[in-house]
Amino acid sequence: MKTLRSIAYKGTSDYVNMGGNLIRQPLPTQELDQVDPFLLLHHYKYDVGPYSPGLSLSPHPHRGFEPVTFIFKGEQLHRDSLGNEGVLNAGDVQWMTAGSGIVHDEGPSKEFVGTMEGIQLWVNLPKKFKMTTPKYQDVKAEKMPLIPIENDKGSIKIVAGELNGQTGPTSTFTEINAFVVNIEANGKTTIPIPKHHELLVYLLEGETRINDAQTLKDGKLQMLTFHKDGETIELEANKNSTLLILSGEPIEEEVTSWGPYVMNTQTEIMEAMRDFQQGKMGHLY
């Protein structure tokens, strides 16, 4: 019988102000800098309409990591300095590799009215891949395998990595599992996790008990991390719930970040700032 992992950290999902927009930020916090290789997790939810534009950011650069966007409700328009433009719909995921540098913009389309909800996750890149050529993986919902939860009590969507012999469509530079769990009240499931992976579980909505030890609840406790002392986690929903489960092989390298850049040294950060100012990451108007 496989061992359940013990809980290392319990976190809320407090609001932060980002450019005038209030969004939840469970990672990083004053107590938790990162869950290697995961550096940042933003959870946003807005009503979009004629007088409420929702989360809309001006063009901004990225270098040295992978910004990943999960869309849970509504839609989101994205465009960049490479000439890419498209719309993500509910259930879709965009796995962007910023690599050597890109200028990017995102927000609701002019036509969209309704609720927009998503998560942006920052995934670190190892030093040898930080200056790789930028690329996108726009992964449509129907391309991601669904693993049914027993007794038809929901499903687990595989965005990246492997679960129960099925593999997600997203390619990653290091070992990463990214699962979206939709579980109904009284549903119960056990998910295997590689023992060498770091692990976090984030609750978007609902109420779910983890390992019969801690209950995640919307607006209360929403994120857990775990010690590497077991091979599984167990979920039991008290209410219909949506959770994001992320596990990954730690990179274990020095991380130096400033704003939208994540590198290994302060010198590399200065180089990124200079390259952006000189237009080497392209332009977006």
Image: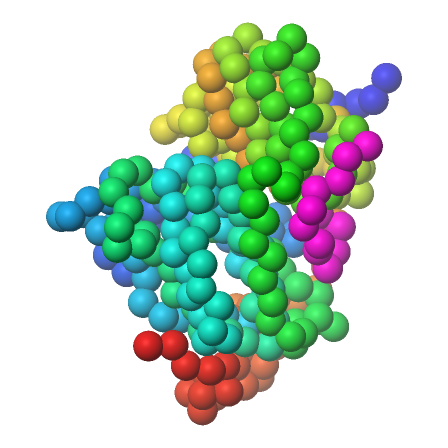
Q: Which residue is drawn at 36% across and 28% down?
A: 219
Is residue 200 among what the camera can see?
Answer: no
Judge whether 262 appears above or below 45 on screen: below
Quarter of the image with the N terminus in it: top right
Q: Is residue 240 magenta?
A: no
Where residue 270 appears, as percent x and y from the top left, is: 51, 84
Using residue 93 as the reference point, say whether residue 87 is left or right of it. left
Judge whether 132 appears above or below 30 on screen: below
Q: Which residue is drawn at 29% across and 42% down?
A: 46
Is residue 70 among what the camera can see?
Answer: yes
Q: Is residue 172 magenta?
A: yes
Magenta span dominant secondary structure: loop
Judge whether 39 appears above or below 12 on screen: below
Looking at this view, name the residue that lies furthest to the bottom: 278
Quarter of the image with the C terminus in it: bottom left
Q: Residue at x 58, y 13 (%)?
A: 153
Where residue 215 appears, as percent x and y from the top left, is: 51, 20
Q: Toward the viewer: 202 or 212?
A: 202
Q: Residue at x 50, y 38 (%)?
A: 91
Looking at this view, name the residue that lies furthest to the right: 1
Q: Toward the viewer: 275 or 224?
A: 275
Where residue 277 appears, as percent x and y from the top left, is: 42, 87
The magenta stretch is: 165-177
